Image (tube, grey):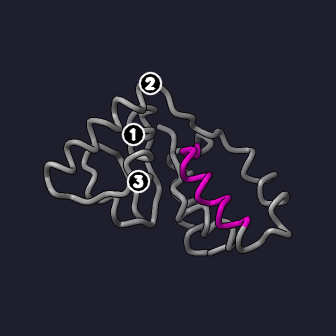
Amino acid sequence: MSLALDTSVLIDIEKENQATIKSLRDILAIHPLFPQLPFISYFEFLVGIKIRKPHKYQEIVSFFNKFNILHTTNKTIEILTELKIKYDRLGISLSLADLLIASQVIENQLILVTKDKDFEKIEEIKKIIL
């Protein structure tokens, strides 16, 4: 099964956080397929880079463009709708970005790798929280 990387993990890779990089290497030893990026994770990451490191933007984009970017489909919308309704009815507040990431993870049968504990609330996804 392939992995999807959340924004929090992308930020740590860019910052060369050794603990996250080691954890990711260990996970990749078990799940060797090249990780994928939900489009909203990549978007959030690029916004941060444009603001924090505009001088390194092209270099960073060149590295992360090696990853497959997951794009939305009609199925993504259906899953997103169901998740939003379910968690709103349960009174569980989740950001639209997190729900969109979860939708793409479900649709593409991926395992989400994240540092964001909010994903613990979403029971439908397979996840590894660092």
Name the one closer to the observer, 30 or 55.
Answer: 55
Q: CA distance from mark 2 to mark 1?
A: 11 Å
Residue type, mark 3 in image: Asp
The residue pinned by badge 2 equals: 74
Residue type, mark 1 in image: Ser
The image shows residue 85 at horizontal and vertical percentages of 22, 42
Q: Residues within 10 Å of mark 2 (few under 14, many from 20)?
A: few
Kindly check if marks 3 and 1 are in contact, taking CB atoms under 8 A apart as contact: no
**76 in magenta:** no
Number of the front mark, 2 or 1: 2
Q: Main secondary structure of the magenta part?
A: helix
The residue at 44%/52% (across/down) is 97
Q: Is residue 75 left or right of residue 121?
A: right
Lower sequence index among marks 3 and 2: 2
Lower sequence index among marks 2 and 1: 2
The residue pinned by badge 3 equals: 98
Q: CA distance from mark 3 to mark 1?
A: 9 Å
**42 in magenta:** yes
The residue at 62%/60% (across/down) is 45
- Element under label 2? helix
Residue stretch rendered in magenta on the structure: 36-50
Q: CA distance from mark 3 to mark 2?
A: 18 Å
Q: Quadrant of the C terminus?
A: bottom left
- Element under label 1? helix
The residue pinned by badge 1 equals: 103
Name the one closer to the observer, 92 or 38.
Answer: 92
Lower sequence index among marks 3 and 1: 3
Residue type, mark 2 in image: Asn
Q: Is residue 56 left or right of residue 87?
A: right
The answer to whether residue 87 is above or below residue 71 is: below
The answer to whether residue 65 is above or below residue 21 is: above
